[in-house]
Image: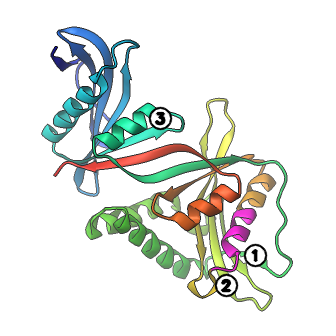
Amino acid sequence: MTTTLRPEGPEETGAGGGRTRRWQILVNGRPVGGLRTNAVVKQGSWAGEISELEVREGQRRGRATVGVLAAEEVLRSWGCSRIDLAVPAGADAALHLAHALGYTETMRHLAKPLDQPPPLPPEVTHRRIGPEQYPDWQAAAVAGYRQELIASGLGPAEATAKAESDHRAALPVGPATPDTVLSHLLDADGRVLGSLWVALRQDRYPDGRPLAWVMLVEVAPEHRGRGHGRTLMRLAERECLAAGVHDLGLNVFSDNGSAIALYDSLGYRVTRRMLSKRLY
């Protein structure tokens, strides 16, 4: 039997001037499923995505594998240097397929429904980051994000460009950006223990509920290992509830075992896994 891809429609312009096309997966010319290829320029190079993969019941004998491999060839011909996949929680077959084809998990999306505001330790306080503190905080935040991106596999130039552009997009007017919480955690003597950045309405669920997002939790190096990361997450939950938002999500790099353990202990659960594969 021969498994191939056939265009389901014309190629379209995707987000940001990229390319997108829907394909049928065929076995001996008979449709058994489909998928979509997307390509977008990110920091000067083409990155690909494979989405909407589905294979009909009773037709799964390697059809998804061959379909993904064919989609990789399409994206390679479009000039993509890597492919990213998003696998929802519970899609174990898709996750197994991705691992078998050489995709590596780079990041996890987690979320938690919020109910009651958790208490904060009495020995700490918090203060909003204002215009005076913002430049130093931003420089440190961009540098830390850049290092995380490099650790996840991006090259130094690509990581620098992405870190800077993501911060500009997320904080267009700095600490005055609407629906944004920027706070320092302080000890009793006013020393900065760490910082928190929360976007209070980063996304919405299909039913319209707002979803807040932890953009950054950072504990000062000299104060790590003392539970301040947990306190900052509790502060994030309190800020969300005070703003009337009852769901909080975040990203965590997959190799950050200590952070994953912390979020798991706080009740955050995986909603999606991000995987990536270099084509050349």
Report x, y in % for residue 131.
61, 77
Query: 256 or 49, which is in the foreground?
Result: 256
Residue that mark 1 sits on: 126
Asked if residue 142 is positioned above or below residue 270 in the image, the reply reads: below
Disc number for residue 92: 3
Disc number for residue 74: none
Residue 242 covered by magenta stretch? no
- Look at label 2 and name its amino acid: Val
The first of marks 1 and 3 along the sequence is: 3
Question: Are circles 1 and 3 on residues that touch, CB within 8 Å?
Answer: no
Which of the two marks, 2 or 3, is nearer to us in this view? Answer: 3
Residue occupying the far top of the picture: 30
- Look at label 1 and name its amino acid: His
- Element marked by disc 3: helix
Which of the two marks, 1 or 3, is nearer to us in this view? Answer: 3
| Total numbered circles | 3
Counting other residues with Cα less than 10 Å from the Cα at mark 3, is it few (<14), some (14-19), or many (20 or more)? few
Provide the residue span drawn in magenta. Answer: 225-235
Residue 230 covered by magenta stretch? yes
State whether residue 15 appears in this view.
no
Q: Residue at x 41, y 13 (%)?
A: 57
The first of marks 2 and 3 along the sequence is: 3
- Look at label 3 and name its amino acid: Asp
